[in-house]
């Protein structure tokens, strides 16, 4: 995102925004090596068939982390020191796929108290011996990652869906802000540009109605 120094998150958020605008869930993942070089990236493509960085599309396994792992070049598959950044806490499928790779550090943009499954890394004997470290990010990056996840789901599910209770309980202030924007129609329902995304997160939504 231009003008914002989020480091590796910049690429993740750009890709998550691409997923959101394509009609999939706004989630993306980037893998870096021990030197900090990006070696693979992927995004959620559950609902779109656009040619992007992701090869797995239009299927229930077309999650961001699966696509990033699928894009990891053969000569990088066995190296140590890989870190996976993902905008949303991995689901059971993705945490399993990460465990089967050489990735031993996962950095999470925003928590997913509904489908997120990093707790499996502690309660399952096989996964625990993998020694995968998980870090959760906070602040502006967390809020942007949450916003793209939450808004995607709002386009997918009815408001009664239990995922919203879970997300609203975990991030009450962030969720309320986005619900207010959706209810006031300040936030476009289908597409967002970077500026609109930042305005939604910053709560400066006075100009969004024109979009
Ligand atoms: Zn997943």
Image (cartoon, rainbow, N blue to C red):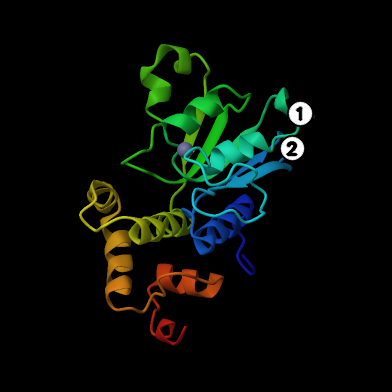
On-image quarter of the N terminus: bottom right
Tell which of 31 and 183 is nearer to you: 183
Q: Which residue corresponds to the image point at 66% horizontal and 53% vertical from the top-left?
A: 52
| Label 2 secondary element | loop
Residue located at (20% from left, 54% from top): 160
Is 208 placed left or right of 159 in the picture? right
Query: Mark 1 or 2, which is nearer the eye?
Result: 1
Residue 35's disc number: 2
Marks 1 and 2, how far apart in space? Answer: 18 Å
- Label 2 CB sits under 8 Å from any ligand 1 atom: no
User: Marks 1 and 2: CB-CB under 8 Å?
Assistant: no
Q: Quadrant of residue 66?
A: top right
In the rendered image, the vertical position of residue 127 relative to residue 103, given as above or below: above
- Look at mark 1 in the image and give the residue it sits on: 74
Count of labels in the image: 2
Relative vertical location of residue 41 with respect to residue 99 in this rendering, above or below: below
In the picture, measured across the screen, residue 81 lies left or right of residue 112, that is right
Dot 2, crowdedness within 10 Å: few (<14), some or many (≥20)? few
Q: Is mark 1 within 8 Å of ligand 1?
A: no
How far across and how far down the image is residue 106, in percent? Answer: 53, 35
Query: In x, y percent, where is residue 149?
Result: 42, 54
Quarter-of-image position of residue 14:
bottom right
Percent x, y of residue 185: 33, 78
Image spot of residue 64 (x, y percent): 54, 44
Identity of the residue drawn at 38% across and 61% down: 151
């Amino acid at each position: 995102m231009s003008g914002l120094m989020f480091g590796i998150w910049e690429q993740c958020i750009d890709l998550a925004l691409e997923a959101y605008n394509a009609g999939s869930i706004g989630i993306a993942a980037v893998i870096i090596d021990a030197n900090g070089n990006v070696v693979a990236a992927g995004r959620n493509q559950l609902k779109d068939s656009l040619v992007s960085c992701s090869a797995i599309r239009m299927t229930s396994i077309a999650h961001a982390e699966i696509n990033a792992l699928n894009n990891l070049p053969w000569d990088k598959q066995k190296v140590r020191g890989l870190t996976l950044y993902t905008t949303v806490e991995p689901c059971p499928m993705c945490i399993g796929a990460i465990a089967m790779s050489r990735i031993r550090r996962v950095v999470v943009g925003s928590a997913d108290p509904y489908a997120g499954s990093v707790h499996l890394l502690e309660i399952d004997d096989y996964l625990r011996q993998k020694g995968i470290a998980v870090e959760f990010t906070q602040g502006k990056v967390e809020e942007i990652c949450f916003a793209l996840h939450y808004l995607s789901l709002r386009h997918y599910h009815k408001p009664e869906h239990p995922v919203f209770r879970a997300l609203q309980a975990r991030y009450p202030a962030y969720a309320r802000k986005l619900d207010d924007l959706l209810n006031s129609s300040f936030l476009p329902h289908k597409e967002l540009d970077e500026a609109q995304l930042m305005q939604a997160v910053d709560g400066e939504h006075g100009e969004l109605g024109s979009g």
